Structure formats: structure tokens, C-alpha cells
Image (cartoon, rainbow, N blue to C red):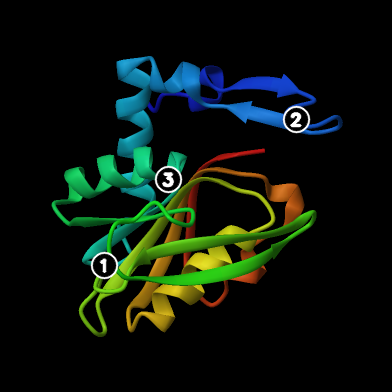
Amino acid sequence: MTLDLKTFIRDVPDFPKPGILFRDITPMLSDATAFAAAIDQLDAATKGIEYTRIIGIESRGFIFGAALAHKRGCGFVPMRKPKKLPRAVVRETYALEYGEDTLEMHDDAFAKGERALIVDDVLATGGTAEAAGRLVSRSHGVVAGFAFLIELDFLNARPRLAPHPVASVVHY
């Protein structure tokens, strides 16, 4: 029987600002069985995607991406906010509804043509994931697909990530 991960995700109204319903995954992370089930379910959801590296988007994408990379026996690449990486980086700046943000990764994170699975905790509007995909492509990598623990279906972000496969485990 598959563990219902929604029972380990807490709703926090009006965070980080009024009108937002935040999906808090910390109860799931603090329960060893639930966290293991989340990684197992992400692994099952991405079985049909071929890749040799996992990109984890800062910060919660690190949690799921690194654990999935360990399970799959592949490399992990952190994609970070600006000025967090110690060597030469490539960067992608992207628009948000309230401004802009930037992602960076080391400029030698991939061999040319290497296939990457981009992992984060939540797929909402898709802007961050889309920017991560552009950064992988600009770095001569290939976006193999995207994986998320949670997808907010009502925001309809999947078309933004097309034509790449998108896997998610928990849907709201």
C-alpha cells in the first residue's frame, strides 16, 4: 500500500503573505517512513526518464534531489541563489510576479549533452523550473525532465515546461 503523503503536509494560511496557502513539508521530512516513501514515490514517478545527473533547485529541491540521486546512483548538481557557489558559474535571471530572481550553477556541472532531471519540492507557476531548464540548456546539458513532490494543478504550469516530461507525486 502506498503511503498517503498528503497526511504529512501541513497547510499554513497566509504565508509568506496574505492570501497564500503554504504547503509545509517539514512534518513529512521529520517522519522517516514518510520521507522514505516520498523518495520512493518520486523514484517510481520518474522511472521512464533517462538521465545521468539530478539538478536540485535551492533549497528544498536539494533535499529531494540529493536523496533521489543517491537512490538512483547518479550525480547531484546544486542550482543555487546568487553568490553561494565558490567557483565560476553560469546564471539565469527570470521574472517573478513581484520582481525577479536568479539561479546559478557551476559552469562545469555537465559534460556536453549530459541528461539532467530537474527536481524541486513544488511546481506552482513553473517560472523557477523553466529558468532552471534554460540554464541547463545554456550549459550544454539536456533537460531530460522535471520532478516535483507537490504540484499545484490549478496553476496549470505543465505547458510551460513542455515538451519535457513532468512527474509529480502529490496533487492539489
Question: Residue 23: percent from the left, percent from the top?
Answer: 63, 29
Q: Is residue 97 above or below residue 150?
A: below
Between circles 3 and 1, the one closer to the viewer is: 3
The quadrant of the image that shows the N terminus is top left
| Category of crowding for the residue at label 1, using alpha-carbon neighbours closer than 10 angstroms: few (below 14), some (14–19), many (at least 20) | some
Q: Which residue is mark 1?
A: 51
Between circles 2 and 1, the one closer to the viewer is: 2
- The residue sitting at 65% across, 70% down in the picture is 160
Kindly state the secondary structure of the residue where label 2 is placed: strand
User: Tag 3: residue type?
Assistant: Gly
| Category of crowding for the residue at label 3, using alpha-carbon neighbours closer than 10 angstroms: few (below 14), some (14–19), many (at least 20) | many
Distance from Cα at disc 2 to Cα at disc 1: 33 Å
Mark 3 or mark 1, earlier in chain = 1
In this view of the protein, which residue sits in the foreground, 6 or 127?
A: 127
Kindly state the secondary structure of the residue where label 1 is placed: loop
In this view of the protein, which residue sits in the foreground, 49 or 85?
A: 85
Q: Which residue is mark 3?
A: 61
Q: Can see residue 164?
A: no
Distance from Cα at disc 3 to Cα at disc 1: 17 Å
Examine the image and state in which quarter residue 105 appears.
bottom left
Q: Which residue is mark 2?
A: 21
Q: Total of numbered circles in the picture?
A: 3
User: Tag 2: residue type?
Assistant: Leu
- The residue sitting at 24% across, 73% down in the picture is 108
- The residue sitting at 55% across, 25% down in the picture is 6
Kindly state the secondary structure of the residue where label 3 is placed: helix
Examine the image and state in which quarter residue 3 appears.
top left
